[in-house]
Image (cartoon, helix red, strand yellow):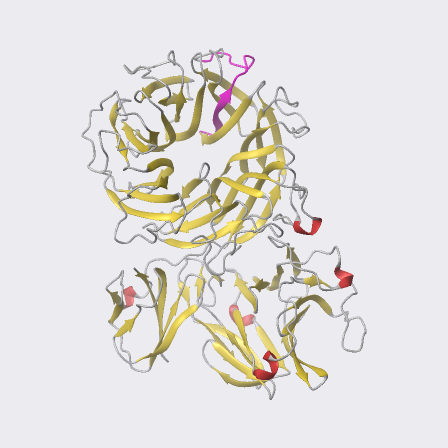
Amino acid sequence: MKYTIFFFLLILAQNHLQATTGFRENCGQIKNQNGQQATAVRFFLQCNGFNVQIRDNGFSYDFIRKHGKETVINRVDFVFENLNPNFSVKKSVPTQPYKKSFVSDNGAIQYEKITFSDFYPGIDLVFKRKGKDLFEYDFEISQYGNIEDITFNISGADIHAVEATEIYLGNTFFQFKEVIPLSFDKQKNPVHVAFDLVGANQVKFKSATHKCEITIDPTPELLYATYTKEDWGIEDVQFLNNMDYITLGYGDPVNIATEGAYQTTLQGTSNVILSRFSSSNVLIWSTYFGAGLTAGFEFVIVEDKIVFCGISNSTDLPTTDAFQPENAGGRDIIISVFSLDGNFEHCTYLGGQLDDSSNSITNLGNGKIAIGGRTNSSDFPVINSNTSFSGNTDAVVAVFDITNYSFLLSTIIGGSQTDFINDVIADNNGGLVFIGATNSASIDVIGEDALPPSLSQIFNGGSFDGLMGTIKSNMSLGFAGYLGSSGSENLRFGGRNSQDKNIIIGAHAGSITPFTADAQFTNLEGSSDGAVLFIFDNNFNIEYCSLLFQPWSFEFGNLVIDESDRIFVISETSSEVNIATGGAFQENLFIYPFSQIPSTDSFIFHLSPQGQKIWGTYFGNYAFQVGTAIDYKDSKLIIAGNTSSDASFPLEYQYSIVTNDAFSQQLTSSGGFIAVFDQLVSVTEPTASQKGLEVFPNPASETIYIIGHDNKGSRYYIYDLSGKVVASQLLNQSSINVASLTSGIYTLAIQSEASFYTIKFIKQ
């Protein structure tokens, strides 16, 4: 539930208190009005005009006002009944530091969130600090919890009125109200939760679906976050079926290999670092791999094998029975295979006499993987292809069968200038789609299939055009073409959903992009570049195209598509607009406190299957946080990336984003991070349409019309994606004016004495 405080003039006239502090744990420094230690208080939050005291059995508001020369404090207590006496407490550190106002608090951490786990059986009580004047507490109810178990008594204020989702309280000196926003069940459908006044000052909650799993906020909850060790960057991460996870990175850290690891010491200037963590975030094994300069970029799990790609200039890699047992010169592509237990199984080089690089690896199924990258070598190995090196830098696609460690294809695609492949997407027929960029005037190879209308046969000008094409299941080239205009385009990463649609994100700078009519953003808002989301149908026609954000740089990132075709994106940005949605895990880009220079933070986007943004959040602090990897499984999201810090900043600004159980809580000058999120809630397809309720048109620009509902005695509420009510009034006609709403996805809730219906609509 979210709670907004309203004051009369007497309250507003009092001296303003510090409004940027976090939750303080009571270590004896918190006193009552008589100067005695307030031993019953577990945590204390200082807000603007009121304080919050959290106790084991509830919490209190202290409303502060001036009466002449005296300061008068009115306390309102919320005391819970029949709670679980054995609940546990979790404390979350802030993403950036709060200011100190208690002398005795010097050096002490102030927390951003306090969780009373299993406060009632199957129910967590979560306290959060939100914004300048907003304090929030949420109930998170699992399938084992019953919302009707929650019971609390209110004392210190009179209950003036109780509506379905609001309680009005106060006395002579102050008034405030408690508000329940839109709630969601485990299937991501809105759930109607209401207050139930069962006594003079006793309140419960009621819901028609009280036995289902309910969460309050449509944003992720951080379960675990850690830094890695010094010089240990993370490039890729993936869940296993048992929710253990594998990480791949590279660097030159020391003492990170576990006992019995395949390679226990660092050899050369940089090694691959391959690790496995348990589902409870405990390091199971970690090994170095390589010599000289050896780096790993991405991996896939194929038939219970870890298969990763990277580069190496070493001549000493273990390559028994390899296709190419020796380095041909410079930096060659490498493909290596390990078991899930960390045992080495295979490695091969692939390259020519100059530098070659792999940028991506993709599981094609049936034991096959595809590599996308680039080559500068005129003698790059070509297998089952009649292509040849065209000059400068050419794009490379290779298909490898791990069942017999053989290449089915190695082909070169490009022209006389610079061509490269950033990612490869598996299709459902044993073939693949490749994406990247090119500034060659023409591509030397012509495929077997006609070029889709969305692509061009020639370079369109500017710095780069997007490069896009297909390799068919028989390993022949389907087509290759340009996507772009007079500016600069670079297709960075993508995936394929269950409807055979290709979801692709690319860099965009100063070009004319074919934004579709339902695009969420089309304006760079002063930035020189941005990121664009494309959705192509199975014939490679552009179905959706929208600007996503304006990054400071856009070199890294990835996306994952879940079983419901929802899209989760990670990358990096220094943009202060169009990133975080209301109620986000981290609502603002971190700003360096002295120089006022924006940092580079990671961000996470959750997009609907149609490409509309559901929620977005920053993830970072005073260090540079570069998100490189993301995966989703069983309602959990894991992200990883690289970080670097500036040790010259004062200690109080070096707050971490890690949790107390982190593998490594120390932020170093260079390293990586891993974070796991839960509570991934989204607004899905209309739940009321089965009952005959419809909204027309949808999407809408000015007015929506309600079809199939008797409006008599009803009230409507419109919620944004943070659960905030943005419009509400009695529904006395069949139309609602939505012209003042900003573009996005909303939920319309219609409540009457006999029913509660919800339906989603899009405001253009």
Query: Is residue 709 located in the magenta-colored stretch of the structure?
Result: no
Q: Is residue 377 above or below residue 465?
A: above
- Give how far across and how far down residue 717 sits, in percent: 38, 72
- Give how far across and how far down residue 59 sits, in percent: 65, 72
Residue placed most toward the observer, 537 or 140 = 537
Query: Is residue 682 rendered to the left or right of residue 37?
Result: left
Query: Is residue 432 rendered to the left or right of residue 589?
Result: left
Main SS class of the magenta portion in the image: loop
Q: Is residue 413 visible?
A: yes
Range of residues picked out in magenta: 303-322
For residue 741, which quarter of the picture? bottom left
- Give how far across and how far down residue 721 sits, in percent: 42, 61
The C terminus: image quadrant? bottom left
Residue placed most toward the observer, 65 or 268 = 65
Residue placed most toward the observer, 730 or 454 = 454
Q: Residue at x 64, y 37 (%)?
A: 669
